[in-house]
Amino acid sequence: MKRFIKDGLFTLLNAFSGGLDGRASILMYHAVAKDDRFFTVEPEAFERQLSYLKKNGLEIVKLSRLLDKMAKGQAVSRSVVLSFDDGYRDNYATVFPLLKKYGFQATIFVVTGSLGKKPGMMSESQIREMQTSGLVEFMPHSRSHHDLDRLPLAEAAREIEASRDDLEMLLGGPADIFAYPRGRFTPELEQYLRSHSFRAAVTVEEGLVTLKTDPFRLPRNSIDSTTTDIQFRGKVSGAISLYVRFKAFFKPKRHV
């Protein structure tokens, strides 16, 4: 029932929202496989989504490229970023071949302490191969995926710096865009990134990116096992902005 209602709402919003003129959408994936985890997208659904992006002429870019445009004041219209969190092995086995098939780029945020150590996670050699292709860039997502807002700032900073160091040593290039684990952060963490040579950080809040968006609070639109084709179309159009406003309007007010 919830999915039916959400599909109906997105059908309505899609009809009136327009495209991505002057705006960009950062999509947030995790795994692409056949399993029953909430955050997993089935390969067939993922390819349908890529096909939709291709047919509609949207520009698929790495997040670093989108940030370059923002820094230079260049148009971000009709840009879409495919971002993936954690570093699951299916990102190499399933996602990578499809990126090559469609000629698309992607940004993967890696929990570096899990590489080649936990079941189902990518190995360092797989990451090097993907990076060498020019289609994929890798950025830090902490070393152990702790909720950084619950750690003392010094400990959270070690998690951040360790993951950046791990990737820069592995790949030999800058790893200066951070993904807050589970989207949790504090003003102090945000300020730490700003003052320690990071370019940007991504959240899990939904919405679209414009030239005025704070680069350290970049919104991302989650694509998971519950995302229908109708909802996907809305998340790469102005519909997602209307949806965010709709949810905020009906969200219960907190009384102090």
Image (cartoon, helix red, strand yellow):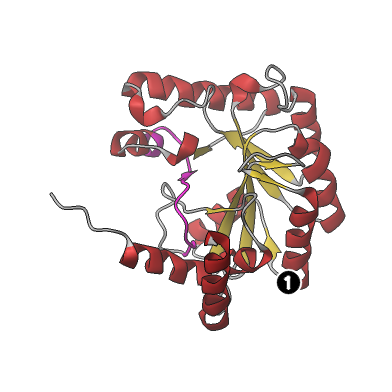
Quarter of the image containing the N terminus?
A: bottom right
Which residue appears at 82% of the width and 37% of the height?
93
Q: Assess whether residue 200 is covered by the magenta stretch.
A: yes
Left or right of 96, for residue 251: left
Q: Give the residue type that dot 1 points to.
A: Gly
Residue range highlighted in magenta: 193-210
Q: Secondary structure at mark 1?
A: loop
Residue 21's place in the image compared with 133, above or below, is below
Classified by dominant secondary structure, the portion drawn in magenta counts as: loop
Which residue appears at 72% of the width and 21% of the height?
119
> Tag 1: Cα neighbours inside 10 Å, few (<14), some, or many (≥20)?
few
Residue 101's place in the image compared with 202, above or below, is below
Residue 46's place in the image compared with 235, above or below, is above
Left or right of 105, for residue 79: left
The x, y position of residue 94, in whole percent, is: 81, 42
Which residue appears at 50% of the width and 38% of the height?
178
The x, y position of residue 245, in whole percent, is: 38, 68
* Residue 126 lies in quadrant: top right
Q: Assess whether residue 69 is covered by the magenta stretch.
A: no
* Residue 157 lies in quadrant: top left
- Residue identifier under label 1: 57
